[in-house]
């Protein structure tokens, strides 16, 4: 899950800013498509290692527990498919 975010279009409340700052500081969130592309080019062959690192998984889990409902099967299926891809 990598995100490209336009600050001029999307505003976050203070609660969401905390997790999105973690996303940004750990390479999950980008505000510049060139920087996102550079990250992908640099890490393409070790993207799974990065994705499954403890720090990234802790942030993803935090987001999941806070914003996604466990009982929502469609989101769980999407999450599982994304995990298989990455």
Image (cartoon, helix red, strand yellow):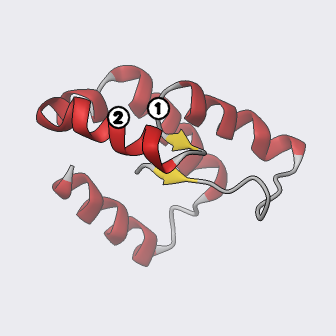
Left or right side of 86 for 13: right
The residue drawn where x is 15% and y is 30% is 46
Vertical placement of residue 77 versus 48, above or below: below
Residue pointed to by mark 2: 39
Residue at 23% from the left image edge and 31% from the top image edge: 43
User: Is the residue marked by circle 1 packed among few (<14), some (14-19), or many (20+) residues within 10 Å?
Assistant: some
- Label 2, label 1: how far apart the Cα atoms are: 8 Å
Q: Nearer the viewer, residue 30 or 46?
A: 30
Which of 16 and 40 lies nearest the eye of the viewer? 40
**Secondary structure type for disc 2:** helix
Q: Position of residue 75 (x, y in %)?
A: 44, 70
- Foreground of the two, 29 or 81: 29
- The residue under label 1 is 27
Which mark is in front, 2 or 1?
A: 2
Q: Is residue 8 above or below residue 49?
A: below
Marks counted in the figure total 2
**What residue occupies the far right of the structure in this picture?**
14
Q: Earlier in the sequence, mark 2 or mark 1?
A: 1
Quick check: 69 left or right of 46?
right
For the residues bearing labels 2 and 1, Cβ distance under 8 angstroms: yes
Q: Secondary structure at mark 1?
A: loop
| Residue at 45% in and 38% down | 35
């Amino acid at each position: 899950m990598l995100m490209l975010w336009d600050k001029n279009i999307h505003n976050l409340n203070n609660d969401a800013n905390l997790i999105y700052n973690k996303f940004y500081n750990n390479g999950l969130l980008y505000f510049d498509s060139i920087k996102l592309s550079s990250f992908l080019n640099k890490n393409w062959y070790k993207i799974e290692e990065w994705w499954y690192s403890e720090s990234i998984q802790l942030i993803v889990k935090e987001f999941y527990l806070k914003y996604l409902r466990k009982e929502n099967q469609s989101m769980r299926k999407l999450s599982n498919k994304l995990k298989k891809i990455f």
